[in-house]
Image: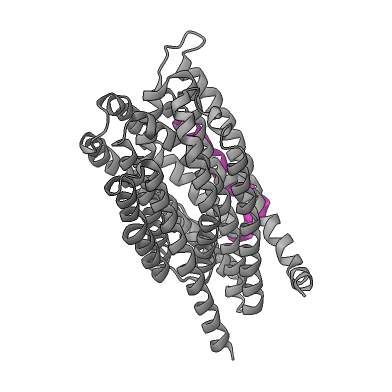
């Protein structure tokens, strides 16, 4: 019986995986930039600079995901318009998305420069860590503007189902980022050793080039000719901007609530000492890699369900939703097993500090536990975004992470004295809450669509 049901989903698995594969690699690229930073700094600069990278990422990631969330607002709208064969509408949406993203990039830089740079002085962190962190945070904030331009073109292309070019650009961008980071951090070929600042410069250069190449691809490729006749640079239409922000702003808040809770956990971990903070950075970086891969599956679910929703084909919409849940459960189950089996070896990728390795190895066991919850909650969000349901899921993420997860982390880790393990158990509880509530929301929304269609 079960085998027969799975066979019925086979075309949906294959179609979703074909679309998700490049998106997974592209999404993973955002995390690999910061992973490469951690690896290079951990090996070439030491434990205190690695702790500084952890602090900066915990602050900067909140700003970055706000931008990525806003940029994401165009994807379901593009998928729905394409499903309705409203091709000219796609070019108009791109015009407005580009303007929104450019303004958002400037605003987010100002938030970092005038807000975050001052805030890290008051987070009860090691003074040496703060001193190393500030220059890196400033340089990284400059990269938000080109990242937002890249994201506008990337989300436009992915909304139409063209995912491979962004993947290729991301792969080569990461190769360049690693090479430049080593060059700048170590100070090779006559360059001075820049330490943590070096990985900031490499990321900035990488993101500028990625934005230029992705824009060139969209405007030159024959794949997009029929979508761009009504594209005009700096074209602003109130209704289109409202529609993009109507999805993008709640998605940004969803990211903020989740990533903000994890950033808060990193700050709490920092109060326990530099070694614990560095270990937290190692384990959370590995977990973030699998999360970003799961978010690629979720992005494919958004595109498939959005396209089906635009065609009012609710049977196909449900099949794509269920197949996405199946795929992410299988994938995250494998990564959970790898974390459990390789927990003693994976931290060596980042550092040779035995104390940091020992703590990180214990955290990876807990990371294995929350993999399934992390994957299913992000896919739930992706499905609901495709349908255009973003407000209630935003409330769910707030409850899960800021009412349950982060307070639970502080209660278990600090108040009850469980230390860094308690912090991670609190985060796991938040992910479990989000996963369960989003699944229930998906079931209710799809049932409502079926009732309306009768």
Instruction: Count numbered badges in the picture.
Output: 0
User: Residue at (53%, 51%) from the top-left corner?
Assistant: 369
**Of residues 160 and 309, which is closer to you in this image?**
309
- What residue do we see at 38% from left, 60% from top? 249
As drawn, is 268 to the left or to the right of 229?
left
Q: Position of residue 90 (x, y in %)?
A: 54, 62
Looking at the rendering, in which quadrant would you find the C terminus?
bottom right
Residue 190 in the image: above or below residue 22: above
Residue 368 location in percent, x, y? 55, 48
Residue 446 image point, x, y percent: 55, 78
In the rendering, at what x and y percent does residue 127 appear? 25, 26
Specify whether residue 87 is in view: yes
Q: Which residues are magenta?
A: 204-227
- For this view, does 66 lie left or right of residue 228? left
Please, is residue 415 above or below residue 445 in the view? above
Residue 255 part of the magenta-drawn span: no
Q: Quadrant of residue 110?
A: top left
Relative to the observer, which residue lies in front, 162 or 237?
162
Instruction: Please name the predominant secondary structure of the magenta segment in the image.
Output: helix
> Foreground residue, 392 or 126?
126
Determine if the magenta segment contains residue 205: yes
Q: Residue lying furthest top in this view?
A: 190
Q: Nearer the viewer, residue 327 or 115?
A: 327
9 versus 336 height, above or below: below
Residue 230: in sight, yes or no? no
Q: Is residue 33 left or right of residue 305?
A: left
Q: Quadrant of residue 128?
A: top left
Q: Residue at x 31, y 42 (%)?
A: 268
Q: Which quarter of the image is occupied by the N terminus?
A: bottom right
The furthest residue to the bottom? 454
Residue depicted at 23% across the width and 39% down the height: 119
């Amino acid at each position: 019986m079960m085998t027969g049901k799975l066979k019925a989903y086979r075309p949906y698995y294959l179609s979703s995986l074909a679309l998700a594969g490049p998106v997974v690699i592209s999404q993973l690229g955002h995390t690999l930039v910061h992973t490469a930073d951690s690896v290079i700094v951990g090996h070439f600069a030491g434990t205190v600079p690695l702790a500084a990278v952890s602090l900066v990422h915990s602050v900067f990631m909140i700003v970055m995901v706000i931008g990525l969330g806003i940029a994401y607002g165009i994807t379901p709208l593009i998928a729905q318009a394409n499903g309705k064969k409203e091709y000219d509408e796609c070019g108009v949406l791109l015009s407005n998305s580009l303007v929104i993203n450019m303004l958002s990039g400037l605003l987010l830089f100002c938030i970092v420069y005038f807000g975050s740079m001052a805030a890290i002085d008051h987070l009860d962190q090691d003074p040496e860590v703060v001193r190393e962190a500030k220059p890196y945070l400033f340089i990284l904030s400059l990269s938000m503007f080109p990242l937002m331009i890249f994201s506008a073109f990337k989300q436009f292309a992915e909304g139409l189902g063209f995912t491979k070019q962004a993947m290729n650009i991301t792969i080569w961008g990461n190769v360049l980022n690693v090479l430049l980071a080593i060059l700048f951090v170590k100070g090779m070929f006559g360059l001075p050793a820049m330490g943590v600042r070096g990985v900031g410069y490499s990321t900035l250069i990488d993101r500028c080039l990625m934005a230029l190449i992705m824009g060139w691809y969209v405007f030159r490729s024959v794949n997009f000719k029929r979508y761009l006749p009504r594209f005009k640079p700096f074209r602003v239409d109130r209704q289109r901007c409202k529609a993009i922000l109507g999805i993008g702003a709640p998605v940004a808040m969803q990211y903020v609530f989740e990533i903000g809770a994890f950033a808060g956990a990193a700050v709490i971990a920092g109060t326990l000492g530099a070694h614990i903070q560095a270990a937290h950075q190692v384990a959370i970086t590995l977990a973030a890699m699998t999360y970003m891969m799961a978010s690629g599956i979720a992005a494919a679910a958004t595109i498939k369900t959005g396209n089906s929703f635009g065609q009012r084909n609710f049977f196909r919409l449900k099949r794509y939703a269920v197949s996405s849940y199946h795929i992410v459960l299988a994938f995250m189950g494998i990564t959970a097993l790898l974390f459990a089996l390789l927990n003693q070896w994976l931290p060596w990728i980042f550092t040779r500090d035995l104390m940091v390795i020992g703590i990180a190895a214990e955290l990876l066991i807990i990371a294995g536990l929350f993999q399934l919850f992390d994957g299913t909650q992000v896919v739930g969000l992706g499905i609901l975004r495709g349908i255009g349901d973003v407000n209630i899921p935003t409330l769910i993420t707030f409850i899960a992470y800021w009412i349950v997860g982060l307070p639970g982390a502080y209660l278990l880790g600090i108040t009850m004295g469980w230390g860094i393990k308690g912090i991670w158990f609190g985060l796991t509880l938040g992910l479990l809450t989000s996963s369960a509530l989003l699944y229930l929301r998906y079931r209710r929304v799809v049932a409502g669509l079926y009732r309306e269609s009768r």
